Amino acid sequence: MHAQQSRPVHLRRIDPTQNMRRFYCLTVQPTLFGGASLIRNWGRIGTRGQTMMETFDCPDNAAQALVRIERTKMRRGYRELVDGVV
């Protein structure tokens, strides 16, 4: 797995006009059998949210899924959280 692909992604979408304060986190974690799991956590800011884990046989496939989901969320208005600033 490449270093750039293994970084966790923290996205936020805040729109006061719609009372919307959401977060979306993506992380790739290695499995015990040489594969990788894509862990997604999402919900309203201030809550624990929901978590989903998807397992892949190849770490590169998990990294590709992370990039695909990140692009989708960015198109929907989410922005990356960098050093505590959106």
Image: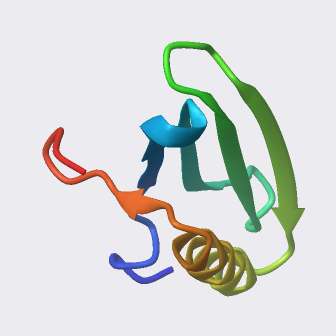
Indicate how the structure is coloured in the image: rainbow
Of residues 20 and 69, which is closer to you in this image? 20
Of residues 54 and 17, which is closer to you in this image? 17
Up/down of 50 relative to 71, above or below: above
Up/down of 11 relative to 65, above or below: above
Residue 19 falls in which quadrant of the image? top right
Direction from residue 1 to residue 53 in the image, left or right: right
Q: Which residue is drawn at 74% across and 57% down?
A: 37
The x, y position of residue 35, in whole percent, is: 76, 67
Residue 80 falls in which quadrant of the image? bottom left
Q: Residue at x 44, y 43 (%)?
A: 14
The x, y position of residue 15, in whole percent, is: 47, 44
Of residues 5 and 26, which is closer to you in this image? 26
Query: Could you tell me how many numbered marks the image carries?
Result: 0
Up/down of 28 relative to 42, above or below: below
Direction from residue 10 to residue 77 in the image, left or right: right
| Residue placed furthest toward the front | 17
Residue 72 falls in which quadrant of the image? bottom right
The x, y position of residue 11, in whole percent, is: 45, 53
| Residue placed furthest toward the top | 47
The x, y position of residue 58, in whole percent, is: 77, 81
Direction from residue 38 to residue 12 in the image, left or right: left
Q: Residue at x 54, y 47 (%)?
A: 25
Q: Residue at x 81, y 59 (%)?
A: 33
Direction from residue 6 to residue 20 in the image, left or right: right
